[in-house]
Image (cartoon, rainbow, N blue to C red):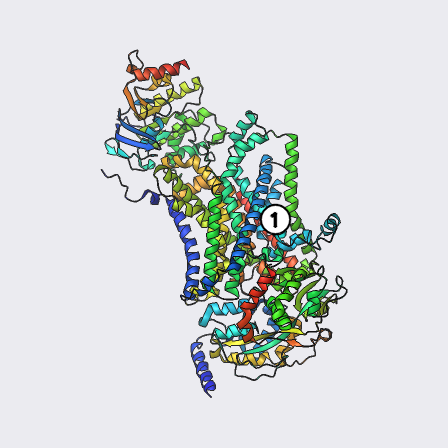
Amino acid sequence: MSRQPAHPVALRDTRIVAGIAALAFVAVLIGGAFLGLVIESAGDFSGAAAAFDSYLFRVVRFTLWQAALSTALSVVSALFVARALSRHPVFFGRSFILQLFAIPLALPAIVAALGVLALYGRAGYFAGLLTTVGGENWPGVYGLSGILVAHVFFNLPLCVRLFLEALQTVPADQWRLASQLGMSTRPAFRFIEWPALRQALPGVAGLVFMLCITSFTIVLILGGGPRATTLEVAIYQALRFDFDPARAVALTLLQILLTFAVVALLSRLGANTAAESGLSVAPRRYLSIGRSETILNALLVMLALLFVGGPMMATIAAGLQSDLARLAGERAVHLAVATSAALALLSALLATILSVSLAMARRGLATERGRKNRGPLLEYLIDTGAGFVLVVPPIVIGAGWFLALRHVGSVFAIAPVMVVAVNAIMAMPFALRAIRPAYDAASERHERLCAQLGITGWARLRLIDWPVLRRPLATAFAFAMALSLGDLGVIALFGSDTLQTLPYLLLARMGSYRTADAAGLALLLGLVCFALILLADRLGKERSL
Amino acid sequence: MTADVPARQGVPLHLDRTTFSYGETSLAFDVEFPAGEITAVMGPSGSGKSTLLNLVAGFETPLSGNVLIDGRDFSSASPFERPVSMVFQENNLFAHLDVFSNVGLGISPSLALTPRDHKAIADALARTGLAGKEKRLPRELSGGERQRVALARALVRDRPVLLLDEPFASLGPALREDMLDLVAAVQTERKMTTLFVTHQPEDARHVAAHVVFLENGTVAAAGKARDFFSSNGPAAFRRYAGAMNER
Amino acid sequence: MRKTMSALISALALAVATLPAAAKDKLTVYTYESFTAEWGPGPQVKKAFEAECDCEVDFVSVADGVALLNRVKLEGAATKADIVLGLDTNLTADAKASGLFVPHGTTPALDVPGGWNDDTFVPYDYGYFAVVYDTEKLKTAPASLKGLVEGDVSQKIAIQDPRTSTPGLGLLLWVRSVYGDKAPEAWAKLKNRVLTVTPGWSEAYSLFTKGEAPMVLSYTTSPAYHMIAEKTDRYQAASFSEGHYLQVEVAGVTTTGAKNPLSGKFVAFMTSPKFQDVVPETNWMFPAGKMDKPLDPAFETLVKPAKTLAFSPEEVAKNRKAWVDEWLTVMSK
């Protein structure tokens, strides 16, 4: 009797097929761009070779250094803030804080930089105080400190939300157990929270690292001079000023390689602590939290809120000084709001679909591997590998596709498609981080049951996965949307007067002396983002609980 | 209830020289389970009880050998394709779905149910003493009730082989006895070839006609329950049961 | 003669190609964002030219001049652009080398400092780079580039990066043209006065208006915007005794545009008063040709450079990389 099934087991699982399709989509989008650039360079790689000089060495060193520091600061502080928030699942303003925490992602770097400077700059709110304390004129946060402050502003809220998502996969029963065993804060962290956090840690840290390694505007503005230059700047320069596709590709590959090395290191921090996760019978968590811890937690959350909210408040204050009534009446603004919202929603939808496919496929493969000793390469590619799209600069993807498509048809006609597609894959790693822990936990519980009952494909998605994943999906969707909403990299290449988003319009105003308008538009952008996040949150609310 | 279901013959189940390994442990089973009767699968922790059930259910694929159900080899079929229902120790239910849907999934994995199916589900719930609890969510049920839902689902699935992987381990003695009676009654009606993993000798004595005793990943002894529980039962089993009783 | 013939043939070809299409001929102009913005010259220019040519002008805009050239390079010979409007003299050598532009074949009446003799690109406006300062923060502005380089290091300036922006490159060339081979030494001193180096003009100017730095590298015409649009003379340009570096903005006809008879008409229109009247108060630059209406008096109050400094496009193209590298070496120390 034949032991071999008709086709490989992996392919029988539709989830894995979906994941491979998602991966293929990403590969085509990135690969096509590279191909376009390589063909354009027509075999002339002298520019690429010349790029590797001592200047590049210095750039690489600085890039890694600032990214590592930014990541460490963001992640470590977020661990504590997320923990504090998770210890108090109900308090007034909690969901507002979390919604607020999605907004920095949507702010264009220049808006955030101005927000940070409004506080800590030479002319910032704190300048007087800092001058009194320091004894001499406050020099502003320019330099590494400025870069770190801005990066933490961007990434701390992101990390907090992702870690919180991971903490929420801890079954309520474990909390009951903890309180029953009389676990105080320290052991509860060690035995319950830390394992869940540790599992999420490498992914989240990798994500933040990727964001920081590709930082461009923040590094240039707040870095204080060309000493603070990232590889991304060199790539941008190679394409924009020197128009040397080969060098751009070489530098991008270097960036991917460096990130790969760091992410590989980070993955050692994590541990596969797949715990048995039984059905949570407890309707809610039983926590006994001491008074002093409550105060400490409140303090932590307040600090984070001030740190993140400060630059946002400054942005709001600046925005309120603009002629908002006139702006709100402008047709160009209406159009930009509509365009931004439409593109962001589409990108977010695509990003979420891609991420769910990848999360499912990875889980499917991991389950598969448990039985057969299958090579984990595909699994790795699907999980972390897909995240590397983040370190491919949008300008590279955009330029590559321009070159690849120029013989085929009008680039303008496909501009909206490109914007949605590229933004979606850029947002995908964030969405994936939000979805994966919840999906894995749900799968842990449901896998055998689904296999036994033959619940697969669409039925499984509809009946089993969707109800459980509503909330993380909404988080993922909100992230993806905020990110696409704030995009300037992709739109800068594909934008035109027929395709203007809110950040694009903002930059245009800023570029023609209309700084007040730009401030008003930044406020508007924040509001649109907030409204869309509220919407996503509402969609994610579980009906029964 | 019994009127709807035609009297039937059970199917024989044969693990034909199956081997399996994970990590350092290797297991080998070559055992037949009598058709249409309850066999208690017993043995110390780590002896391979759950693995044996997983091989039958299709959660594990043997390295060699065949899983023969009614003479047909199912060793590489997916769990859903096998004529098998299984009740786990826990996680038998989808937490977000009510009792009715959890049972209904046993008939249609996409929950596309006909009026006849509705009737079948209602009957199965009535049979397992869950009438009126259709709309409850799993967390609103007691531990015993949750396992009854799983049994109800096995009823509507109506497969000839039933695997019970310590399903009542967490229930109290009185409740457990109720559940065992239910299993026995259902089994008599449906003539399912039932494998019942348990640590409790009295459970096995209560419902099982046969016993298969595992030790170190292989079958150490097999035979009729009354022989096992007599004073001249297999020595290995007596040691094990004695140790259990002392606890 | 050959030109007339080819123009005739291409006109015929175009007529045949567009026969079943709409009645109106179309001219596609690629330009930068602030040109086509509501407050920019674009809308008025479009209206005036369409009235004259009985055609339709289609503006396509990208972020800035550099992006503009890149866009055309990326599209190559298949570009939809007839006219590319918004390059500056630092980009024209590169643009010519791409082979995507054709000679304009006209001799427009121009008024550009230092004269004009480029056969491919036609200027439509110009301006001078200048250090703009906040009179409320800085009582005495530097009177020369030397004064800027050697002045009080606690009075900071926000500048742009020559690797990513046009004004940044402008300052680099300005320092070069004043200090020659001693430019690195000058930068080593100036470095201490630099608050930060931003990727583009907008970021630096935002820092300046937010009060982060009392000085910014911008244009001599910047104060005109604040005077006319905001009715304030708080922001002024400092007049430098060594002279100011010139930036000339130009347009050119692409190989695609060579087949469109409207291209030539547009180039001629561009240097005519109807176009030039619009430039000063929408693009905030000086007109490159004759105007019908007088310049706003505010423009008369602006800094008039003692001397116009400029490298030829060829010199810039040849040395840009070396000079930027040199700048990098000094600034990264």
Q: Is residue A490 visible?
A: no
Q: Position of residue A369 (x, y in %)?
A: 37, 40
Which quadrant is home to the C terminus of chain B? Answer: top left
- In the image, is residue A77 above or below residue A255? above
Q: Along the line of sight, which residue is nearer the eye, C6 or A191?
A: A191
Q: Residues within 10 Å of mark 1 (few under 14, many from 20)?
A: many
Q: Along the line of sight, which residue is nearer the eye, A295 or C95?
A: C95
Q: Is residue A61 visible?
A: yes
Q: From the viewer's perspective, is A156 left or right of B92?
A: right
Query: Extreme bottom residue here?
Result: C1
Classify mark 1: helix, strand or loop: helix
Q: Which residue is mark 1?
A: A153
- In the image, is residue A528 above or below residue C122? above
- In the image, is residue C267 above or below residue A352? below
Q: Position of residue A195 (x, y in %)?
A: 51, 35
Q: Label 1 amino acid?
A: Phe
Identify the residue shown where x is 52% and y is 69%.
Answer: C69
Count of marks placed on residues? 1
Q: Position of residue C8 (x, y in %)?
A: 46, 84
Q: Position of residue B106 (x, y in %)?
A: 37, 34
Which quadrant is home to the N terminus of chain B? Answer: top left
Pointer 1 chain: A
Query: Extreme top residue here?
Result: B231
